[in-house]
């Protein structure tokens, strides 16, 4: 199992490039199920979850090419015949976002058999809202030995029907799953209390390019006029706003001068506002953001909210920064019930953090020491790397496969701006 070895103390200096957004690419790849034509997606990140999605689509009968040559980072998907519309447990258990194929499969083939995603380190991660929405569109969904068996009306021979759905809770993949189902449903759908994340807007842009009739993506209310068929399209995936945010915090925590390039600054508003409150200097360009130290970091409270609020996927990274700020910061996690797995590891490195319910209280500035630490989930792993970049000595991070799920060439990108970080494989020197 690969490890990272990180020696702290270097300010990050220079330019670092952001890849395409994993959480846009995953629903967009699933959207290819909705047509028998070819869908081409560009700016695909080379991360483990994308490979998992490729395997999932191929296992159902799709043709999927995935190229990462210099100019590529492109995937070509053709779901001509979906001979086996089943999302098997062996794949789903490694990536719960596989549930994103549920809506498209029912809409395209009338039937779907999708393994129920287990929970994960950060919470139970139910998909009850996906199911309720599809049932409102006329699907019949039963549970069978850990699988969801879903059929469209008329025992899988009919089309889904447009519906008026008000989401009990704001759900990103729930909004995406049902948006894809509604695109091919009969009649109009109106969704309220939708997720407004840029990944939803990115998916809607692809669906519209495929011939879908969608208004309001990116707002709380989305209207969809179902169409009988969708055609192929070519679409470029948004830059990854969480990767960009992670690098901005890397520049801030190391007291460096870092330009984060090929990003979308308008997706980073809440994060930029928050780290400016910490005393960090920010210059915003068209497709880049420069972060520079503004002297000692200052404490600032933070609460995670759905977009456009401060993203839960940046909570762990912000907590690492807060350990280096003078004063006390509270960090409140409103989205997931168990997203403080990084706290104990940060404490082992010398951080002063206490948890009460959904709020962690961080008392800084705490000099961090190197230690052997364990990665538990994607963003907690990133938080530990950020802490290691300022820790005294050499920190060993185990189970970095969590990080490989969502960050492309993470250690190479950081090394390129002065970080002392290298990967230690089981087979010495394995890339
Ligand atoms: C997406 O997960 C992202 N994943 C997550 O990123 C991200 O943390 C999350 O949205 C919140 O922004 C992808 O896009 C692939 P939710 P998702 O449905 O859609 C509850 C990462 O690090 N809920 O918006 O699964 C749920 O338990 C990952 O890249 C229900 O109760 O999250 C949670 O408390 C981690 N019933 C809240 O809603 C449902 O049917 C928000 O979850 C669905 C969700």
Image (cartoon, rainbow, N blue to C red):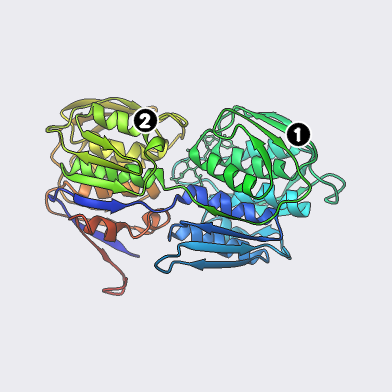
> Separation of disc 1 and disc 2 at Cα?
34 Å
**In this picture, residue 257 sits left or right of residue 204:** left
For the C terminus, which image quadrant? Answer: bottom left
CB at disc 2 and ligand 1 closer than 8 Å: no
For the N terminus, which image quadrant? Answer: bottom left
Closer to the camera in the image, 143 or 414: 414
* Other-residue count near label 1 (Cα within 10 Å), few / some / many at <14 / 14–19 / ≥20: some
**In this picture, residue 93 sits left or right of residue 110:** left
Work out whether residue 125 can be spotted. Answer: no
Residue shown at 26% from the left, 32% from the top:
275
Find residue 428 and report its horizontal and vertical position in percent: 26, 74
Vertical placement of 43 versus 282: above or below?
below
What is the quadrant of residue 232 in the picture? Answer: bottom right
Closer to the camera in the image, 389 or 250: 250
| Residue with the mark numbered 1 | 188
Residue shown at 62% from the left, 48% from the top:
209
CB at disc 1 and ligand 1 closer than 8 Å: no
Residue shown at 52% from the left, 45% from the top:
119
Q: Secondary structure at mark 2?
A: helix
Find residue 35 and report its horizontal and vertical position in percent: 70, 56
What is the quadrant of residue 421 in the picture? Answer: bottom left
* Other-residue count near label 2 (Cα within 10 Å), few / some / many at <14 / 14–19 / ≥20: some
**In this picture, residue 400 sits left or right of residue 159:** left
Work out whether residue 140 can be spotted. Answer: yes
Question: Could you tell which of marks 1 and 2 lies nearer the N-terminus?
Answer: 1
Residue shown at 39% from the left, 49% from the top:
378
Vertical placement of 63 versus 246: above or below?
below
Closer to the camera in the image, 395 or 155: 155
Vertical placement of 317 versus 361: above or below?
below
Find residue 141 and report its horizontal and vertical position in percent: 75, 44
Q: Which mark is residue 290?
A: none
| Residue with the mark numbered 2 | 270
């Amino acid at each position: 199992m690969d490890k990272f070895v990180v020696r702290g103390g270097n300010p990050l200096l220079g330019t670092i490039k952001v890849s395409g957004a994993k959480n846009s690419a995953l629903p967009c790849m699933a959207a290819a199920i909705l047509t028998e034509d070819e869908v081409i997606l560009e700016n695909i990140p080379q991360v483990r979850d994308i490979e998992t999605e490729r395997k999932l689509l191929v296992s159902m009968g799709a043709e999927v090419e995935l190229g990462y040559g210099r100019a590529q980072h492109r995937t070509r998907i053709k779901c001509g015949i979906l001979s086996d519309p089943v999302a098997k447990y062996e794949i789903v258990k490694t990536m719960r976002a596989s549930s994103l194929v549920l809506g498209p499969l029912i809409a395209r083939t009338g039937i779907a058999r999708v393994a129920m995603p287990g929970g994960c380190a950060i919470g139970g991660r139910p998909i009850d809202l996906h199911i309720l929405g599809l049932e409102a569109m006329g699907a019949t969904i039963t549970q069978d030995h850990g699988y969801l068996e879903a059929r469209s009306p008329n025992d899988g021979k009919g089309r889904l029907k447009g519906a008026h759905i008000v989401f009990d809770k704001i759900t990103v993949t729930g909004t995406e799953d049902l948006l894809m189902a509604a695109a091919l449903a009969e009649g109009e759908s109106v969704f309220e209390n939708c997720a407004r994340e840029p990944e939803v807007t990115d998916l809607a842009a692809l669906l519209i390019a495929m011939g879908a009739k969608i208004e309001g993506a990116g707002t709380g209310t989305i209207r969809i006029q179902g169409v009988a068929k969708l055609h192929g399209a070519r679409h470029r995936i948004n830059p990854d706003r969480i990767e960009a945010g992670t690098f901005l915090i890397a520049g801030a925590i190391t007291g460096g001068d870092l330009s984060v390039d090929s990003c979308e600054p308008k997706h980073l508003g809440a994060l930029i506002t928050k780290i400016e409150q910490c005393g960090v200097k920010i210059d915003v360009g068209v497709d880049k953001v420069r972060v520079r130290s503004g002297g000692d970091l200052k404490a600032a409270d933070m609460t995670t909210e759905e977009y456009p609020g401060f993203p839960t996927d940046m909570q762990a990274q912000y907590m690492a920064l807060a350990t280096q700020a003078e004063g006390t910061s509270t960090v409140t996690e409103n989205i997931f019930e168990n997203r403080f797995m990084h706290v104990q590891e940060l404490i082992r490195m010398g951080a002063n953090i206490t948890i009460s319910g959904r709020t962690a209280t961080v008392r800084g500035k705490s000099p961090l020491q190197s230690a052997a630490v364990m990665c538990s989930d994607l963003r907690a792993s990133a938080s530990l790397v950020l802490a290691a970049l300022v820790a005294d000595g050499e920190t060993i991070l185990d189970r970095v496969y969590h990080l490989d799920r969502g960050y492309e060439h993470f250690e190479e990108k950081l090394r390129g701006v002065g970080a002392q970080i290298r990967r230690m494989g089981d087979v010495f020197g394995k890339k």
